[in-house]
Image (cartoon, grey):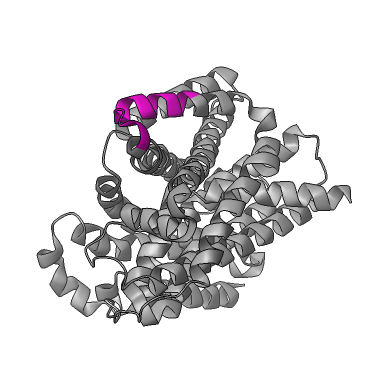
Amino acid sequence: MMKTKETLVTGFALFSMFFGAGNLILPPFLGFNAGPEWFLVALGFFISAVALPLLGILAHARLQGTMLDFANKVSPVFSIIYCLFVYAISISLPAPRTASVTHEMAIQPFFGSSSLLTSSIYFILVLVFVLNRSKILDILGKFLTPLIIGILLAIIGIGLFSVHPEMRPSGFETPVISGILEGYQTFDAIGAVVVGGVIIISLNLKGHDSFKAKKQLISRAGVLAGLGLFLIYLGLILSGAMSNAEFDEDITRTALLSGLSLNTLGNIGNVFLSVLVSLACFTTAVGIITGTADFMKGLLGESQQAYLATAIIGCILGVVMGQFDVHYIIDVALPALMFIYPITIVLIFLNVLPERFASKAVFRAVVIVTLIFSIPDFLSTVGLADKMQAVKDMIPFANYSIGWLLPVILTFAIANLLSRKSK
């Protein structure tokens, strides 16, 4: 009974750390634009926003170290650079975005206060939670997540059983690919390698010392969190699709979510949505800042001063970046995501695979090829799309922003064949 309760608490805590700003505003908008093809975009979104994060948690359960272990087989130097880059992105973009979404959807409509005031109070509260490190898992898992899930189910459930006009046609040429790329914006694959470390350290602080027991607990909690994410995403995407004829085609992501909550829960819907947005965003920000502070503490010899300094710097950066518009932060994040996401994806896959398929030579070859073939996608998002077009035309699937995929699969196969031959 105790194990079941701890699995539920850990799974709920994982869910809450994953489920933040992007997870709320992206799925309904995806369904809204997909219309009748909502299932295809849901499939793509499931691949990048559910399956990959789940594999990331399973990799953590297998490694039970820090994020450094994800890339150590490439080289220790590369691992440190990769980790610093991921944590820098995490505290600079997805963490501040949670404050920006909270202000736009939960504070400004009621109080009309400045975004500076919102983000300042918001990250002071985040800092309080981060400094109470040993209690994070229980607070998130026992109290905040059930509230988030309850409000979400109310919005989705009422919306699905309401009468809607006929859907408008899909606006996507390749709905599955569009779903995959939109899933990038949730940061969930990156989130998996960040918050997975938070879970491991939290369990260690609670006195868990059995490798096998922790592996089982983390794996089960990951599956539970993944199932929760899948069902919520599916409901939000379908809600957006069923309502796509009820709103203007140029509606924004945040306005659509507000409209859906108003349609389902009436005037009180805005209050419920405000609570939902605030909780969902807050738990994610706590997970990101805690993960970053944990990493810097471990990197600098278990220094508590490093933990405190990183937490404070992360919160100050959150206040500064939280002043920007949500859609601006999403646009700014795209180039970084197009570069770091493919690397994160292949590292997750390689760390899940059995050792005989993922030697150091395989790690190095696959990661190098991923880096090379991610460059055209990255450059295309920073204003060089025209110059990159000739290159992308020569690479299979590059025009769908996944030009790295086929070269990586081939490299993985060839590296394994050569490795076996040399043995």
Left or right of 404? Residue 324 is left
Against 275, residue 356 (above or below) is: below
Left or right of 420? Residue 402 is left
Instruction: Looking at the picture, tell me which residue is in the foreground, 86 or 418.
Output: 86
- Outermost residue toward the left? 386
Residue 242 % position (x, y): 41, 74
Instruction: Looking at the picture, tell me which residue is in the foreground, 166 or 101.
Output: 166
346 in magenta? no
Instruction: Looking at the picture, tell me which residue is in the foreground, 182 or 90.
Output: 182
Q: Which residues are magenta?
A: 110-124
122 in magenta? yes
The residue lying at 33 percent from left, 36 percent from top is: 108
The mark tally for this picture is 0
- Outermost residue toward the right? 1
Instruction: Looking at the picture, tell me which residue is in the foreground, 355 or 325.
Output: 325
Against 125, residue 37 (above or below) is: below
The residue lying at 43 percent from left, 50 percent from top is: 267
Residue 235 in view of the camera: yes
- Outermost residue toward the front? 267
Residue 131 % position (x, y): 59, 23
Residue 32 image-quadrant placement: bottom left
The residue lying at 51 percent from left, 71 percent from top is: 160
Residue 113 % position (x, y): 31, 28
Residue 350 in view of the camera: no
Look at the magenta stretch and give its main secondary structure. Answer: helix
Query: Quick one: quadrant of the C terminus?
Result: bottom right
Against 376, residue 213 (above or below) is: above
Residue 136 % position (x, y): 65, 34
Against 231, residue 186 (above or below) is: above
